[in-house]
Amino acid sequence: MFDPTAFDNMKVVVEGAIYDIDLAGKIVIIDRNDIVNLAKMSRSFDVSFTLPDAQVTAVIEINSNIINLAAELLPNSLAENQSGCYIQLKFNHHGITDATHLNKVERILLEIWGGTRKISQSVTINHTESEVYNVHLIELDRLVREDQILDLVELIDSMVLTLENIEDYLSKINLN
């Protein structure tokens, strides 16, 4: 048996919180990836979920690299403040190209996540399939440490709230 790393502990908490909400019927998990990159000695974990019968999906991604792992496992080798993980959140859907609608979605994100997070939006148009893809990315833009692990459960609740608000807005502009 090995001593779990901060990445392992955060992954278990996030996964458990999301599966609890899925079992309660509030969300539906649609994808899950747990990747170990042996060439770069990094790890990533992500879970994608949506509200039942909805078009907006949410993805939480947790990443840890060799510096984060070494800081945790090798005492005095690196500053302790390098131990932890990076987290980013994505909200995906189809159909918005109008700047007014994109601005409204950005306001929804700012209301929930505040102005201290790095929020970006991208619109990809696939002309051959006549499809528009929207991605709204929220980066915590800092290392999340293991002592903040309980905040991750609140983060999941905020993701569900974000899904509900974006879904509600899209239904009002008839994109669903």
Image (cartoon, rainbow, N blue to C red):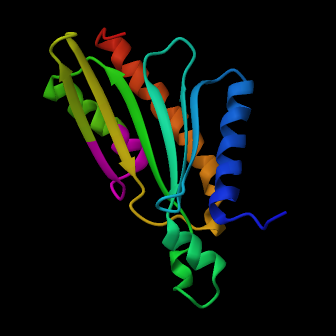
Q: Can you give x and y, in whole percent of width and height, for residue 140 in the image?
A: 42, 57
Q: Can you give x and y, in whole percent of width and height, for residue 3 in the image?
A: 78, 68
For the N terminus, the quadrant is bottom right
Residue 25 visible in image: yes
Residue at image coords 38%, 61%: 141
Q: Can you give x and y, in whole percent of width and height, for residue 110 in the image?
A: 34, 45
**Residue farthest toward the front in the current orientation of the protein:** 39
For this view, does 121 lie left or right of residue 166? left
Is residue 33 shown in magenta? no
Camera-side residue of 80 and 148: 80
Q: Is residue 160 above or below residue 110?
A: above
Camera-side residue of 44 and 132: 44
For the C terminus, the quadrant is top left
Q: Which residues are magenta?
A: 109-120
For this view, does 16 lie left or right of residue 69? right
For this view, does 75 lie left or right of residue 165? right
For this view, does 130 lie left or right of residue 71? left
Q: How many marks?
A: 0
Residue 150 visible in image: no
Residue at image coords 70%, 58%: 9
Q: Can you give x and y, in whole percent of width and height, for residue 165 in the image?
A: 43, 27
**Residue farthest toward the bottom in the current orientation of the protein:** 76
Residue 120 in which image quadrant: top left
Residue at image coords 65%, 64%: 6
Residue at image coords 69%, 31%: 21
Q: Is residue 74 above or below residue 31?
A: below
